[in-house]
Amino acid sequence: MKNLQKEPIPAISTEEKPGRKMIEIIGLKKGFNNQEVLKDISLQLFSGENLVVLGKSGSGKSVLIQCIIRLLVPDAGSIEVLGSDVNSLNKNELDELRRKIGFLFQSGALYDSMTVKQNLEFPLRRIRKHLTEKEIKEKVNEVLENVGLADALNKMPSQLSGGMRKRISLARTIVIDPSIMLYDEPTTGLDPVTSDEISALINEVQKKYKTSSIIITHDIECAKATADRIMMLQDGEVYLEGKVKDFENSTDPIIKSFFK
Amino acid sequence: MKNLHPVIKIRSFATGKSVKISEKAIEKTQLATEFFSDIGNMAIFIKQIVKETFSRDFEFKEFLRQCYEIGNKSLPLIAITGAIMGVVLTIQSRPALEDFGAVTMLPGMVAISIIREIGPVITALILAGKIGSGMGAELGSMKVSEQIDAMEVSATNPMRYLVVTRVLAATFMVPILVLFADALGLFGSWVGVNIKGDVSLVLFLSQAFSSVEFIDFFPALVKSFFFGSVIGIVGCYKGYNAGRGTESVGVAANSAVVLSSLLVIVVDLIAVQITDMIL
Ligand SMILES: Nc1ncnc2c1ncn2[C@@H]1O[C@H](COP(=O)(O)OP(=O)(O)OP(=O)(O)O)[C@@H](O)[C@H]1O
Ligand SMILES: [Mg+2]
């Protein structure tokens, strides 16, 4: 694999002190027409770590990370990302913040009408406008190689398998050099082998690009493979937070049902 | 899912007896309420479109791409329909004119009906089906598969990138397609005239255009622009506001066609009233 040089992102220093808070959420609440999804969530994401958020389907995991980049607006609580309060930003400031966050959508969200190449160029052209054509081309090739799909350049998303789509959307997410990554169920719907490959990719991204990540999943294997720390959601609240072994050793029936 | 309403009993004033209101009736009123709240939401949507249209970063490339998509893909359909309408209209009108011994008026009469009404309305209705459903389905599936969210986090305003470009493209392309349909309609009419006679194309056209005036032409063109924007707005509105499941893509496409066809007819009615008043 190619030797990667991460371009410094302006406005935040590249040498982040370990332990710096990248994301801090306090008392987050969110519901949809009298259905309370998140009741009281607080979490912190520290620089360089992989935080896995576990929870069963429908427990509001996607809602949680959508609040972080303000695709959804919370009912109450504060969300600070890289030191700025997400809900008090204006449009430009919000765009500015979103440039530093990579979001891997649960469904991949590849643009159906564009080729893989155009898909990867889209965020580059829009977020990093100063790049030359040559730099764009290099960047696209670099991330494609990183996810091991250099030959998919001119394919349409409909020609890709599920696992390939996940990889391409991962490539599209890291192409902008984010400092925070939000993964929404990166391995759901994939076979165990491909899941392991994706988990490995997540760890690789963490090392190579020095990202801090929140990984949403209900796949225990993926959680074990990627987590520095795990948080479990249950009924809209944080049920348990700790290291992998805290979960494995737990005698709590709900946690045991996950970590069989 | 909404809760199902039980059958409600209401005491009638006249008879003093209880009257049952069925769930069906309640559903109907719900449908009506939905229709009106739809119209209200659409007004807000239009306001947003107007605001984004005049913003700094207009997505010109995407606009051109949409124009090409709409124009190019609808051309064959519009051509065939236009020509057939011309033939049919001519054949149908001939007997009536023959009764009055006024067959020479056939080209002029058909030209006026095509240019004033048949061309714009038939074209708009066909395009409501074709591009309205296309937009509803495309944006709907982009919404469901989180592509619109993905755009938003890529610092791209999806309203500007997806909606404004499509609405403007429809607004400009529909009148062009209408002119095209008019032209082919006239050609079809010439063919129709020649089934039972022998008129050269030049003579036919001079006969046709001797009765067509600017007044026939201009209002039809203006209303075509409105047809175009109605189709674009409704298609985008339905797609952009699709629900969360995959089935909502079909719903979006379907209701886009229904509502835009209906609105095309309504706009036509309003247009005819206005032209009547002014001219
Ligand atoms: N935009 C929305 N509008 C209305 N309800 C929503 C919306 N987004 C989520 N919900 C509701 O919030 C609840 C939690 O949804 P969410 O997608 O966060 O679950 P999840 O934990 O990600 O589940 P899964 O593992 O299946 O993805 C669900 O009941 C869902 O119906
Ligand atoms: Mg989810």
Image (cartoon, coloured by chain):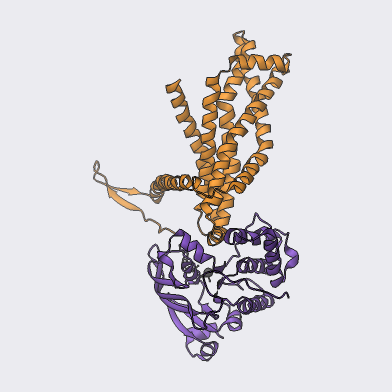
Chain colours: A purple, B orange
Q: Position of residue B266 (x, y in %)?
A: 47, 34
Q: Is residue B247 left or right of residue B31?
A: right
Question: Which residue is situated farthest in the top direction here?
Answer: B101
- Report the front residue among A116 and A63: A116
The relative height of residue A133 versus residue B87 in the rendered view (above or below) is: below
- Report the front residue among B70 and B101: B70
Count of all numbered marks drawn on residues in the image: 0
The relative height of residue A57 versus residue B234 in the rendered view (above or below) is: below
Question: Which residue is situated farthest in the right direction here?
Answer: A151
Where, quadrant-wise, is the N terminus of chain B in this rendering? bottom left
Which residue is located at x 39 percent, y 71 percent? A78
Q: Position of residue B153 (x, y in %)?
A: 53, 62
Q: Which quadrant of the figure has residue B213?
A: top right
The relative height of residue A118 versus residue A20 in the rendered view (above or below) is: above
Q: Position of residue A50 (x, y in %)?
A: 55, 80
Which residue is located at x 76 percent, y 65 percent? A151
The relative height of residue B178 versus residue B57 in the rendered view (above or below) is: above
Which residue is located at x 50 percent, y 64 percent? A96
Q: Is residue A158 left or right of residue A95?
A: right
Q: Is residue B94 visible?
A: no
Q: Which quadrant of the figure has residue B96?
A: top right
Q: Position of residue A60 (x, y in %)?
A: 47, 71
Q: Is residue B224 visible?
A: yes
